[in-house]
Image (spheres, grey):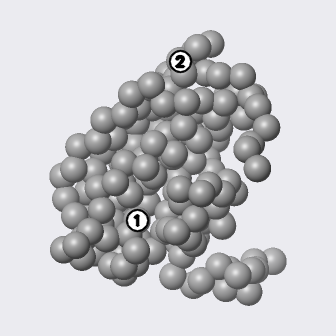
Amino acid sequence: MTIDPSIAGIPRDVPHGFEPHFRKSPLTDPWEPLYARKTERAVILGLRLARPHTNSRGLIHGGLIAALADAAMGYSCAQATGWTTSFVTISLAVDFVGSANVGQWLAVEGDVIKTGSTICFAQSLIKADDVTIARANGTFRVVPKKEPAS
């Protein structure tokens, strides 16, 4: 039996497989609603672009892209290691190759390149309606898990 996503509180324009994002953050609260889809080794973040995601010219803001790419890659490192450790960003690089507008579906596709006992390397493609608009790579340090701040 398939449940209609809109009955579960997910709008019909959210692509199949995405659910409300499982991890809230004060940084991303203004960008809600955020969605996530997990694969075996990755986490894909998604959202429908709206005015709060734009710069003064009405295009998606590069800071939003960088922050979501950082998060998707860090979550992907955690997913690939069974969520047994936490990660903090050592380095982050983003190449902007396109733009996006209000109304488009933004997907930030994390991908783990290599995990180790102290470092994880990841990359991501950022797509607006399935067209690549940026790519990012990051290096993440393994840190002991601690309880989230209240």
Query: Counting other residues with Cα less than 10 Å from the Cα at mark 2, is it few (<14), some (14-19), or many (20 or more)?
Result: some
Look at the image and tell me in which quarter the N terminus lies: bottom right
Image height check: is 48 above or below 81?
below
Write the residue at 29% across / 56% down.
62
Rendered image: mark on residue 57: none
Give the residue pinned by disc 2: 119
| Residue 88: image location, x then y, percent | 55, 30
Task: Give whichever of discs 2 and 1 has the lower sequence position.
Answer: 1
Q: Residue 6 appears in which quarter of the rendering?
A: bottom right
Write the residue at 43% across / 60% down.
107
Task: Tell me the element at label 1.
Answer: strand
Write the residue at 38% across / 57% down.
64
Query: Counting other residues with Cα less than 10 Å from the Cα at mark 1, is it few (<14), some (14-19), or many (20 or more)?
Result: many
Q: Report the front residue among 11 and 62.
A: 62
- Extreme residue in the top direction: 117
Image height check: is 106 above or below 142?
below
Q: Residue 22 appears in which quarter of the rendering?
A: bottom right
- Extreme residue in the front direction: 150
Left or right, 3 with respect to 30, comes to right
| Residue 57: image location, x then y, percent | 18, 74
What distance separates the C-alpha of mark 2 from that of mark 1? 28 Å
Give the residue pinned by disc 1: 106
Report the amino acid beneath label 1: Leu
Report the amino acid beneath label 2: Ile
Total numbered badges shown on the rendered structure: 2
| Residue 92: image location, x then y, percent | 37, 34
Task: Tell me the element at label 2.
Answer: strand
Q: Is residue 107 visible?
A: yes
Q: Is residue 113 visible?
A: no
Q: Report the front residue among 91 and 75.
A: 91
